[in-house]
Amino acid sequence: MAESLVIIPTYKEKENIENIIRKVFSLKEAFHVLIIDDNSPDGTADIVRDLLKEFPEQLFLETRKGKLGLGTAYIHGFKWALRRDYQYIFEMDADFSHNPEDLPRLYYACAKEGYDLAIGSRYINGVNVVNWPMGRVLMSYYASAYVRIVTRMKVRDTTAGFKCYRREVLEAINLDKIKFTGYAFQIEMKFLTWKLGYKIKEISIIFTDRTQGVSKMSKGIFKEAVLGVIKLRLRSIFRTPRKFQGSNI
């Protein structure tokens, strides 16, 4: 059994899902893939079910009743992974904005270099974003700067969603207490990892905006991130994060 699991949440990703799964399985390193589909009306889950016949020991599908948010999808996937023997758990988008060929680089940082969280970073080495309008690039870049100022977290790409966790990190965070669901979820998980003293490495990647399908970005998600950062900072002032002593399984 592979020790690495790539979690890919989906909602209306029929144009991308088969290609992204096949790309991950074409890599030299062994990765399993867990798709968490939020009842996509376009048949995304049906495409995955067909692929399950071809990859019965590498590919897994969890379906949910509706669009419940990115953060809850990943928490569902984290708990699924922790119930099994996965040591390295990845987050990755379905739309090829994250290049699957970078998965081994994230794995190497955790498995070989001793880091606890590896982040595929757009901003650790300049600005590496392709196909975004300048307004969105500036918004994302300065949003990360804002997060660093408020939280004092030493991470350049605070909203990045391409990551590898060592199992121990996810066991140490009380996943039932995670408050946010959109980009703020990504910030909260990094913030808690950092506050708990785990070692974080940012690895420069090139982020390429989707060419197929529709972006799930919304004003509500952005607002949650802006306000959520302040809540995170205030909460940490009055209550120091401690490693979770219970069970996320």
Image (tube, helix red, strand yellow):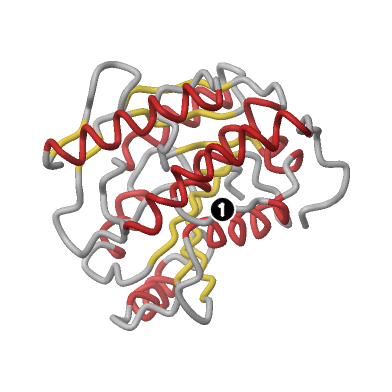
- Above/below status of 126 relative to 56: above
Nearer-the-camera pick, 56 or 209: 209
Q: In x, y percent, where is residue 139?
A: 26, 37
Say how many tags the image has.
Answer: 1
Identify the residue at horizontal 15%, vertical 36% (top origin): 130
Position of the C terminus by quadrant: bottom right
Nearer-the-camera pick, 171 or 181: 181
Mark 1 residue crowding within 10 angstroms, few (<14) / some (14–19) / many (20+): many
- Above/below status of 140 relative to 150: below
Give amino acid for label 1.
Answer: Phe
Identify the residue at horizontal 47%, vertical 37% (top origin): 163
Nearer-the-camera pick, 114 or 22: 114
Identify the residue at horizontal 61%, vertical 18% (top origin): 114
- The residue indicated by pointer 1 is 180
- Above/below status of 246 relative to 36: above
Q: In x, y percent, where is residue 78?
A: 62, 53
Location of residue 170 by image quarter: top right
Q: In x, y percent, where is residue 61?
A: 50, 70
Q: Secondary structure at mark 1?
A: loop
Q: Residue furthest right?
A: 245
Q: In x, y percent, where is residue 34?
A: 50, 60
- Above/below status of 100 relative to 237: below
On the rendered structure, is 109 left or right of 125? right
On the rendered structure, is 225 left or right of 19? right
Location of residue 49 by image quarter: bottom left
